[in-house]
């Protein structure tokens, strides 16, 4: 090991010893965790108090409406629509799902990048800014999952047809309901739920959660 490497390590060790990480922002983090736990319990209790929603297989829907079955609103089904709907739609959606305090707004979508898609879901990571910029409990990076479209009998680009599961938008109901109904009861921390819905005609779905970086999430070309 060279002398300069030893010197750097010694200086770094001395610097770390000067910092009490247990006290560094501990009270603020504790306050945010308690606040988030209370918000989750309240939101999940509200969701469970609503009338049960019956989800039929995609081929049994008797309507052509694209309104969501959970929150009764239109939602974007493509990257272009998401950007066109913009921050104004995110505000309405998050407030309707009670995942964003009513006094806080999404100020803007400041960035968007495509992630490597998996199965039948297209995945995006969007960066958002809030009206309360200093609130550390709000995730600034969000994972957006929506249905990928393909011609019947043809594979998605780069994927052989034999490897594709027969996944329909309605099949994502369990994942959405897990976040929607059980987020407050999980023994481990899960990505924060923001919004999720399936269209009434069963043709599209959307799930927005906190983005947790993963090595496999390479930027798609």
Image (spheres, rainbow, N blue to C red):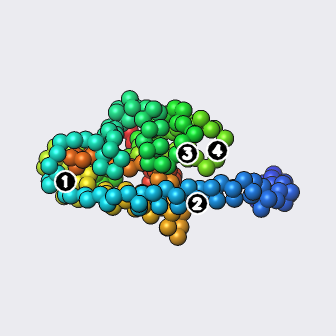
For residue 141, side relative to residue 208 (left or right): right
Q: How dense is the environment of label 2, judged by Cα within 10 Å: few (below 14), some, or many (20 and up)? A: some
Q: Give the number of the disc on residue 37.
A: 2
Q: CA distance from mark 1 to mark 4?
A: 40 Å
Work out whether mark 3 precedes mark 4 in sequence or the reverse, and give the earlier one. 3
Quarter of the C terminus within the rendering: top left
Image position, residue 27 (x, y; %): 75, 57
From the top left corner, tell me how far across and down residue 164 is, in percent.
23, 56
Residue at label 1?
A: 58
Lower sequence index among marks 2 and 3: 2
Q: Residue at left 25%, top 58%?
A: 55
Circle 3 residue: 101
Point out the frontmost of discs 1 and 2. 2
Whether residue 75 is situated above or below residue 16 in the rendered picture: above
User: Do callouts 3 and 1 mark residues in contact (Cβ within 8 Å)?
Assistant: no
Q: Quick check: 176 left or right of 98?
A: left
Indicate which disc, 4 or 2, sits on the residue closer to the N terminus. 2
Residue located at (63% from left, 55% from top): 35
How would you rate the neighbour count of disc 3 (Cα within 10 Å): few for under 14, some for 14-19, many for 20 or more? few
Relative to 101, residue 56 above or below: below
The x and y percentages for residue 75 are 34, 40
Which is nearer the N-term, disc 1 or disc 2? 2
Residue at disc 1, secondary structure:
helix
Please say if the residues under marks 1 and 4 sit with CB atoms less than 8 Å apart: no
3D distance between C-alphas at marks 3 and 4:
11 Å
Task: Mark 3 vs mark 4: give the one in front.
Answer: 3
State which quadrant residue 2 falls in: bottom right
Above or below residue 26? Residue 131 is above
Instruction: Give the CA separation, mark 4 to mark 2.
Output: 15 Å
CB-based contact (under 8 Å), mark 4 and mark 2: no
């Amino acid at each position: 090991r060279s002398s300069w490497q030893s010197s750097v390590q010694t200086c770094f060790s001395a610097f770390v010893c000067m910092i009490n990480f247990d006290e560094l922002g501990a009270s603020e983090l504790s306050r945010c965790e308690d606040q988030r736990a209370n918000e989750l319990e309240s939101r999940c209790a509200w969701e469970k108090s609503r009338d049960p929603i019956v989800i039929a297989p995609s081929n049994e829907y008797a309507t052509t409406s694209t309104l969501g079955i959970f929150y009764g609103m239109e939602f974007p089904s493509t990257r272009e629509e998401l950007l066109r709907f913009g921050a104004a739609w995110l505000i309405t959606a998050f407030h309707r799902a009670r995942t964003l305090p009513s006094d806080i707004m999404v100020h803007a979508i400041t960035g968007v990048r495509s992630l490597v898609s998996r199965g039948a879901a297209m995945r995006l990571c969007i960066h958002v800014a809030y009206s309360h910029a200093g609130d550390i409990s709000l995730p600034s990076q969000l994972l957006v999952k929506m249905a990928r479209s393909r011609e019947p009998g043809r594979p998605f680009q780069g994927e052989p047809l034999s490897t594709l599961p027969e996944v329909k938008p309605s099949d994502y109901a369990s994942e959405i309901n897990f976040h929607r109904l059980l987020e407050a009861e999980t023994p481990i921390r899960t990505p924060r739920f923001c919004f999720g819905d399936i269209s009434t005609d069963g043709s599209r779905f959307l799930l927005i959660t906190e983005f947790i970086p993963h090595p496999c999430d390479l930027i798609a070309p």
